[in-house]
Amino acid sequence: MTKRALDLEAVRAFIRIAELGSFTRAAEASRTTQAAVSLKLKRLEERLGFRLVERTPRYVELSAQGATFLEHARKLIEAHDRAISVVGGTRQRLAIGISDHVAGPELPALIARMNAQD
């Protein structure tokens, strides 16, 4: 039986939630929205088949399975980042979110030129 790979960005979101104890703080640290962090965690939990955190109105607490998974999640991300660093040097990723209306026709061409320089 083939299993689908984990979404590493969802794993990173889970680690931030666990470390910061809050979806809002995890979103701020990730420079994204709380809704995006929540969706990533939901999909990760669905993929794994168990809840990673218990949510209350005031705080987020790791479930027993979440606490166990956290240790492995950290090792996974560390190994991934180390492998990328060794193979890929210091290249970093830049994500830009902008509507087509605001971007205009020039932005795609600019991004293509920037990618070609890599």
Image: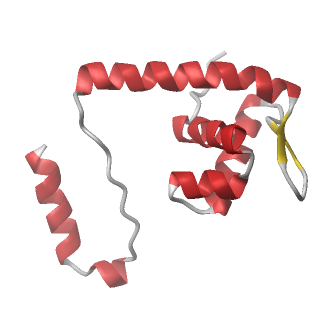
Q: Quadrant of residue 67?
A: top right
Residue at 29%, 78% (x, y): give it: 103
Q: Residue at the bottom extreme?
A: 101
Number of numbered callouts drawn: 0
Residue 57 visible here: yes
Residue 3 visible here: no
Q: Quadrant of residue 36?
A: bottom right
Q: Which of the image's four quarters has the N terminus?
A: top right
Q: Which of the image's four quarters has the C terminus?
A: top left
Residue at 54%, 60% (x, y): give it: 32
Q: Where is residue 100 in the image (x, y as percent from the top left)?
A: 35, 77
> For this view, does 28 lie left or right of residue 53?
left
Q: In which quarter of the image is residue 98?
A: bottom left
Toward the viewer: 58 or 13?
A: 58
Residue at 83%, 25% (x, y): give it: 65
Looking at the image, residue 112 lies above or below residue 74: below
> For this view, does 17 lie left or right of residue 79?
right
Q: Where is residue 48 in the image (x, y as percent from the top left)?
A: 74, 29
Q: Residue at the top extreme?
A: 1
Looking at the image, residue 75 lies above or below residue 100: above
Looking at the image, residue 114 lies above or below residue 47: below
> What coloring was used for the rendering?
secondary structure
Q: Where is residue 114 in the image (x, y as percent from the top left)?
A: 14, 55
Residue at 36%, 19% (x, y): give it: 83
